[in-house]
Image: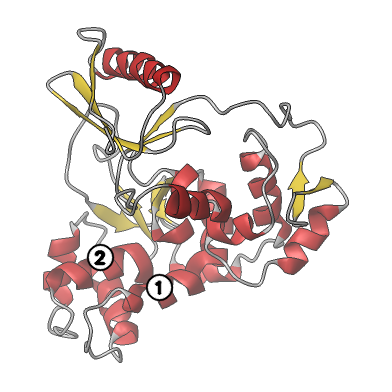
Amino acid sequence: MRTHLMRRTVHLVTADDVLAWRSRHDAMLRQEGPRHLPPGTDRSGPRRTRRGGGEVMSDGEPRSMGELARAVAGRWPAPGPRALGEMLAAALIPMAQLPPRGLWRTRAGERYCPSPTGWAATSIRRHRPASIRSAGRWCGATSRRSAPPPRRDLRAWCGLAGLPAAVAAVREEMVVFRDERGRELLDLPDAPRPDPGTPAPVRFLPAFDNAILGYHTTAAASSTRAPRAVGRGCRVVWSSTAGAAKWNEDADTVTVAPLRPLAEADRAAVEEGGRALASFLSDGRSDRVRVGASPDA
């Protein structure tokens, strides 16, 4: 099921995870929704708008954000249809995002329906799993990184506050390290841990990738080591040596725009990765890649 969860972004999760994780994220999502409204908007309307949206969606008919917003606009017209629809579908009402949206090599508009029968908001809020579920899943999700993550990454990953108890609950099951700044790093006992000097390979990341949004340390590195051009919605080329670049694809050609100077070996690695990506995206029709000039060249 595709639904909005961590950091208010769309995630593909199992039915069991929807019940468990929506209960943990419901308050955060409802708080985050109004924060994205235009300045000066009357913020007294989310409760009645949520109630109205639930009434509209109770017929089970799929709707786009725009259709839902127009159906309830009379209850709270101030935000405008786009902001109102996004807030309802992404924050205020537990929704499922329907196919063909999200299917491989398929483009389609977003259409939503309420979470299936039995997963109504009231039922979800009563399903309160132990907090260690989030912390344990985080440790498993991050165990394949080149280094164990610090605890601050947990909040960046899930978007939740109040997690010290969850971390404490799983701490005895983890291997504990300290980085050069003295921060505590947690890792699974059997997780692979490369030599500290091992360079990270070149990665072509999609827009809004978890490696950029879901880690405090990576986000900090991207803001200090690369220009502001690495935005939240950029497709990023990332490695420990090549630094940041942006990439795009058009007419079966992958184009790369370096954001800082690339050494010869780094450029070769980027070109090799770009050719592999072009072949993958074009079903083998093309391996064309074009790497632009470095900004200081």
* Left or right, 204 with reference to 168: left
Above or below 95: residue 54: below
- Give x and y (percent) for residue 16: 56, 49
Q: Earlier in the sequence, mark 1 or mark 2?
A: 1
Q: Give the residue at mark 1.
A: 32
* Left or right, 113 with reference to 237: left
Q: Quadrant of residue 85?
A: bottom left
- Residue type, label 1: Glu
Q: Look at the numbered discs 1 and 2 and tell me whether their residues touch, using CB distance below 8 Å.
A: no
- Give x and y (percent) for residue 62: 22, 54
Relative depth, front residue between 180 and 160: 180
Q: Residue at x 26, y 58 (%)?
A: 60
Relative depth, front residue between 46 and 6: 6
Q: Quadrant of residue 66?
A: bottom left
Q: Find residue 86 and name its label.
A: 2
- Secondary structure under tag 2 reads helix
Tell which tag, 1 or 2, sits nearer the viewer: 1
Q: Residues within 10 Å of mark 1 (few under 14, many from 20)?
A: some
Q: In which quadrant is the C terminus drawn?
A: top left
- Secondary structure under tag 1 reads helix
Q: Residue furthest front?
A: 297
Q: Residue at x 51, y 50 (%)?
A: 221
Q: Residue at x 52, y 48 (%)?
A: 218
Q: Find residue 228 and name its label.
A: none
- Residue type, label 2: Glu
Query: How many numbered badges does the structure rendering display?
Result: 2
Residue 2 can be seen, yes or no: yes
- Give x and y (percent) for residue 160: 56, 66
Above or below 290: residue 80: below
